[in-house]
Amino acid sequence: MSEKYSGPDAAQHAAPGLSKRQLTTLLGGCVILAVAAWIAEVDPMALFAAGAREQMVAFVAEGIPPESSREYLLGRSLRDGLLWAVVETLAISVVGTSLAVVLAVPLGLTSAATVTHRGPLYRNASASRIAVGRGLYHASRTVLSFLRSVPGIVWGFLFVTAIGLGPFAGVLALAVHNAGVLGKLYADFLEDTDPMTTEAVAGSGATRLQAVCHGMVPQVTPTVASYTLYRWECTVRSAAILGFVGAGGVGYYLVITIQRLQYGKLSTAIVAVFVLVVTNDWLGARLRTRLG
Amino acid sequence: MKNEHTAQSEKQQSGHGLVFDSVTKRFGENVAVRDVSLSLAPGERVAVIGPSGAGKTTLLRLAAGTLRPNAGTVTFNGSTVTGSAATLAYQGETLVDRRTVLSNVLTGQIGGLSWLRGFIEPLLPRYPEPALERLDAVGLVERADVPVKSLSAGERQRVAFARALMQDAEVVLADEPTANLDPSSRQNIIDVLDAAIDGELLITVLHDVHIALEHFERIVGVAGGRIKFDAPASAVADEQLEALFAAGASTPNTDAERTGAKKEGGAPVPRYV
């Protein structure tokens, strides 16, 4: 083993280390990062400027100990206090995600090319049927992109303006934004199913809709359930900031305490969000393992 | 298996049995089946053999009515074939993995149900008797409530037969039923198929020439989208077989790659376009 290999194939094996191509990729990445940093006005020295340091020290000093009065945590009535806001955040995320699924399922189906116009279900379809399917596909993909590209907090602002302050605006905001996210995921999963399985169901004389329901959909249900749960974990984090625009939840406490410079109350709220997110991640992971 | 002679005379009558009349099927530039005429009588057991990309699977799909020819006609007893006249047994891997054997077999009859019942019924198997009967025919009735993913390849193929038999069609088509099976199960699966069908016309695409010659009375050799020979198994000469597979070697395999490469040696399956 100690002898150096010098057989006929020795020259064919690349020497260890970076290849020319890898080196180019690496350099290119560095250039992009540098340009992005310049655009983002990155200035590490700002962290050490005199004012910044004092502000941070003040924040830490005043944030400890966190506010723990009964009135702050529990409030004066049922729908009051920080703990209620945490529960409300969770509730917004549960209802918001459920509503998102209800919207995403039909949109996902009409955004999957294998459902609308491509693949084994459309082998004998007329050209006009395929054109209609393609039109539907593009239209619903566009709707999904739009829903997804408007951030949840902007939807929250719009719904607060429309229906007034409160958690229901937050529910709608999460539902609409996540319908865009989940709809695209569902559509991509449906496009990635085994065409032969769908064809076999269609081959037994099933209509297209039946073949989709009994051939295509059962192939994706476990993945869909798992990703939906994962998305629910993400919506809990989004729900935590919806309060910034008055759409309910614990975000209201974050923004109001910052504005009033009540750092003790702010750190309690941060801890509450932290506990909420960690618990939720743990719960989501457990549910997903159950799904197998 | 003994009705060869009556079958031979019956098939001369036009419009009786399954008839391919000058059938051509193209996929874009590629001609998968060229001007094929073929007549098959009820009760016959036919094996279609040939190299990869010969157009065997396309022929089967045309017979099942899931593909329509670009030219010519495919008829059964005088009328254009439909899903109700012919049933195609797909390969075992086309079952829905997470569902039970029973619910997979029940999807075989969706076509016979109204759309609303077809929508709901396979989810709520309230009338499982016909499916259990088919499962009994392939010897799997005791595994009815097991999810398909826990079955062996041979068992999956048997479930696929049961699913196809749910349609009570007069023509039973099987697409490479021996694919992905070990040699001993290959013999067995053909025996199961033999036992399960009852007087229907059986057409099987086979990769395994020996099994075809051993178990089927009529052999149709296909290469390059054309029929090279059509003869009783006892009359097929070795030279004919050699010529068949030599001719196919030079033929482009684009159709098989698009539609059924999965079964032919595990080549990657490109997405449908």
Image (cartoon, coloured by chain):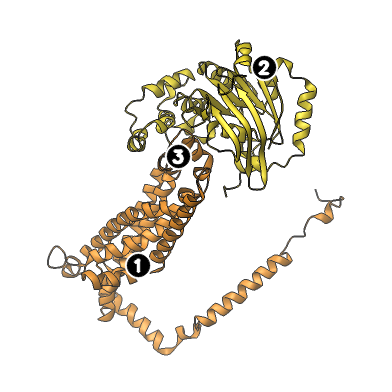
* Label pair 2/1, CB-CB below 8 angstroms: no
Q: Which residue type carries mark 1?
A: Gly
Image quarter of residue A59: bottom left
Q: CA distance from mark 3 to mark 1?
A: 34 Å
In the depicted structure, whether residue B92 falls above or below residue A252: above
Which chain comes out orange in the rendered image?
A
Image quarter of residue A18: bottom right
Q: Secondary structure at mark 1?
A: helix
- Lower sequence index among marks 3 and 1: 1
Q: Is residue A40 left or right of residue A173?
A: right
Q: Which residue type carries mark 2?
A: Glu
* Label pair 3/2, CB-CB below 8 angstroms: no
Which chain comes out yellow in the rendered image?
B
Q: Residue furthest top?
A: B2
* Label pair 3/1, CB-CB below 8 angstroms: no
How far across and how far down the image is residue A43, in percent?
50, 84
- Residue at 45% x, 34% y is A205
Q: Which residue type carries mark 3?
A: Gly
Q: Secondary structure at mark 3?
A: helix
Q: Mark 2 = which residue?
A: B214
How far across and how far down the image is residue A217, in percent?
42, 44
Q: Is residue B27 left or right of residue A126?
A: right
- Residue at 46% x, 59% y is A138
Numbered tag placed on residue A215 in the rendering: 3
- Residue at 25% x, 58% y is A91
Q: Nearer the viewer, residue A18 or A131?
A: A131
In the depicted structure, whether residue B209 falls above or below residue B71: above
